[in-house]
Image (tube, helix red, strand yellow):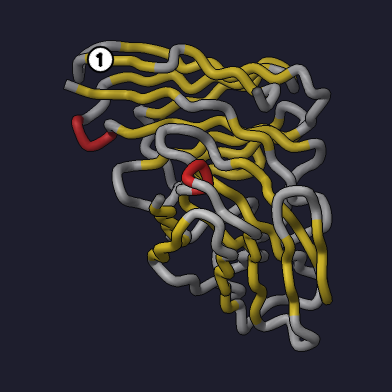
Amino acid sequence: ETGVTQTPRHLVMGMTNKKSLKCEQHLGHNAMYWYKQSAKKPLELMFVYNFKEQTENNSVPSRFSPECPNSSHLFLHLHTLQPEDSALYLCASSQDLILEGGSNTEAFFGQGTRLTVV
Amino acid sequence: LAKTTQPISMDSYEGQEVNITCSHNNIATNDYITWYQQFPSQGPRFIIQGYKTKVTNEVASLFIPADRKSSTLSLPRVSLSDTAVYYCLVGDSSGPGRRALTFGSGTRLQVQP
């Protein structure tokens, strides 16, 4: 257990559905991240939040909509996805925002949500 | 621009020491070097971090030469459960502003019985 909990663990959705992924951490961390990991590809950073404010959007399509109501919770709202969006979606948190290779580079990852778009 | 280069894959046997080297020729002065481990269908897990010379914890050792252009993760006496992908991270300023936690392709370590 890393202290970062993601739900659901698995999700199958149609291209016209709307669903949300949830991430929760009670580690007292101030920064939270969404990553996408497709089969046999490196992790792709999607969004970064620091103190509930979005600090990075890595050119993610608008069909992915993040929400960070407080420092402990992060959501990823999904709508009209495509089959190529099927992937493992990972949430992470860190005490402070990780920039470049700074000294506090330890991030804690959740188990991920395995998303399949049909 | 600080990117990393690692071997795509490595094979080992149980009980052996495994050394995974990462090249980061353009590492910035203030960058630390961090290694993560990822099992299939799980999130990455922090292993070790260092700035220079040698760092050791209960899991691994990290060797960093004086020029810091490379680093070596050393896993003593690996077991089957060490089969995973290992990522080496340093800073990444390739995009606008400063990027957070950029992962490369990693090294896929396969430990055989």
Q: Which residue is mark 1?
A: A13
Give the residue type at disc 1: Met
Give the secondary structure at mark 1.
Answer: strand
Disc 1 sits on a residue from what chain?
A: A
The vertical placement of A15 against B57, above or below, is above
- Front-most of B67 and B58? B58
The residue sitting at 76% across, 58% down in the picture is B49
- Of the 4 image quadrants, the one containing the N terminus of chain A is top right
Residue sticking out furthest to the left: A118
- Identify the image quadrant of residue B41: top left
Q: Residues within 10 Å of mark 1 (few under 14, many from 20)?
A: some
Q: Is residue B50 left or right of residue A85?
A: right
Residue A109 x %, y %: 61, 33
Q: From the viewer's perspective, is residue A19 above or below residue A30?
A: above
Please state which of residues A64 and B42 is positioned toward the viewer in this rendering: B42
Q: Is residue A86 visible?
A: yes
**Horizontal side of residue B24 vs B64, given as left or right:** left
The answer to which quarter of the image holds residue A53 is top right
> What residue lies at 62% left-to-right and 67% top-to-bottom?
B93
On screen, residue A3 versus residue B21, left or right, reads: right
Give percent across and percent down for residue B27: 68, 77
Q: Residue at x 80, y 86 (%)?
A: B66
- In terms of depth relative to the viewer, which is nearer, A112 or B72? B72
The answer, for residue A100, to whether it is visible in the render is no
- Above or below: residue B44 compared with residue A103: above
At 71% across and 50% down in the image, what residue appears? B59
- Residue B37 x, y percent position in the rendering: 56, 48
